[in-house]
Image (spheres, helix red, strand yellow):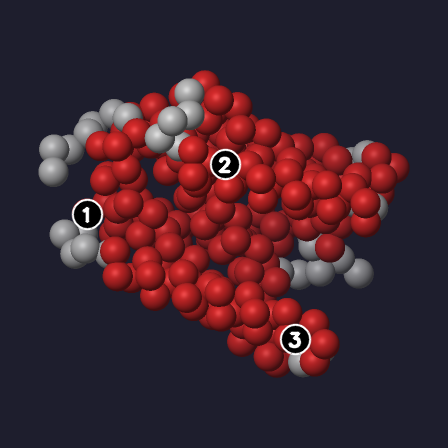
Amino acid sequence: MEENTELFPKMFTWLFIGLLLTFTSGYALYMNQSLLLRLLSSTSLIVIVVVELVIAFVLGIRIQKMNPMTTKILYIIYCLITGITFSSIFIAYEVSSIISIFLITSIIFAALALYGYKTKRDLTNVGTILLFALIGILLAGVVNIFLQNTMFDIVLTSLGVLIFIGYIAYDVQKVKYLVTYVGEEKAAVYGAFSLYLDFINLFIRLIQLFGKRND
């Protein structure tokens, strides 16, 4: 496969933009408690989740036919909307803890992204295993809503860490193949979107396990 030297710098630039938008908008909402409470109402949350799911679905199935600018706009909207739900992190956990977990997540992410970029091993089968594992922990999580078992929740969260660590390497390698079908611009944004989801999910699970909550 011919190496695309421009793809990965663009992809990681878009990833940085997405994470910056989410953390900045989340913190800004945290500083505006009245607006935050309205946005985090049950009705608003349903709308937010539906919009996120629609954007993820559209990006997943329409990426080949989509205009590159539309791809970028949807990505930015997704990251901003995620900032609304992400603002609850600033309420639940100390800022110093958020920063330290963010740095730990970044180090883990960088190591696995480098592996996914450098490895010659085909990770396609790994992706299938990760998908079934993710579905499994999501279903188990639904069951645990009724069981309310703290230890079971810790186990599921720990498994989630391992799954999204695996997804980082898988998604980095996948974008090498994607660029052939959708072009550099769209592959960079879609790759950033996939890695953005990996980063956010890994961060959330790590802070659930190790974060220091506000009193």
| Residue 194 as seen in the image, left or right of residue 142 | left
Which mark's residue is nearer the viewer, 2 or 1?
Answer: 2
Which residue corresponds to mark 2?
58
Element under disc 3: helix
Q: Nearer the N terminus, badge 3 or badge 2?
A: 2
| Residue 163 as seen in the image, left or right of residue 210 | left
Residue 209, given in percent of the width and then of the height, sits at 58, 66
Which mark's residue is nearer the viewer, 3 or 2?
Answer: 2
User: Does 88 sit above or below residue 137?
Assistant: above
Q: Residue at x 64, y 75 (%)?
A: 143
Q: Residue at x 41, y 66 (%)?
A: 132
* Quadrant, the N terminus: top left
Q: Is residue 162 visible?
A: no
Check disc 1: other Cα within 10 Å, few if <14, some if 14-19, many if 20+: few
Which residue corresponds to mark 3?
144
Residue 72, given in percent of the width and then of the height, sits at 47, 25
Which residue corresponds to mark 1?
118
